[in-house]
Image (cartoon, rainbow, N blue to C red):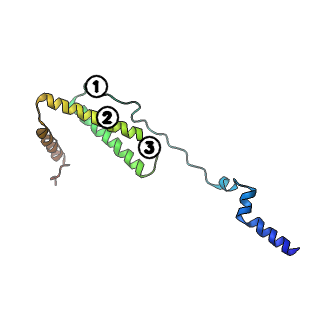
Amino acid sequence: MAALLASSSAAALSSRSCVAQRPFAAAARLPARPAARPMQVVAAKPTKAQEFRGMSNDEIEEAVQQCKRDMFTMRIKFAKREEWKPSDYKALKRKVAQLLTVRRERELAQGIDRRASKAAENRRLVEAGLGKFAS
């Protein structure tokens, strides 16, 4: 009789028998998932380059910088495995491309060639302390 009780108690303590009797008991002991953080909506709809043609050059530069900051924030979220939407990242990339296209169209209208445009951009970066040769 003692051998029978010992074998039945050993069977009752084995993990397989516990799972067979109560298959969802282990899941009930797991901690609850943290509540999802609300996502900020960056780009709800695709933009068109026509929307940016009325902006001044300074506004275009500021919008490009803001979009690049938002893209950087999304890359950080991706690295930290936080929630983010790849479609928002794609929309920001498209917006930056459209803004830069409008800026380049204006330079072409003024007769500025590509080489002079790049030189002016490098001068702006050096003056801001962000260029290659800035100390």
Q: Mark 3 belongs to which amino acid? A: Trp
Dot placed on the residue nearer the N-terminal end, 3 or 1: 1
Dot 2 corresponds to which residue? 95
Tell me the element at label 2.
helix
- From what the image shows, is residue 26 above or below residue 14? above
Going 20% across and 49% down the picture, which residue do you hit? 130
Dot 1 corresponds to which residue? 50
Mark 3 and mark 2 residues within 8 Å of each other at the beta carbon: no
Question: Looking at the picture, how far across and down is residue 128, in whole percent?
Answer: 19, 45
Q: Is residue 92 left or right of residue 7?
A: left
Could you tell me which quadrant the C terminus lies in? bottom left
Question: Looking at the picture, how far across and down is residue 80, in whole percent?
Answer: 43, 52
Question: Looking at the picture, how far across and down is residue 45, in whole percent?
Answer: 40, 30
Tell me the element at label 1.
helix
Q: Mark 2 belongs to which amino acid? A: Lys
Dot 3 corresponds to which residue? 84
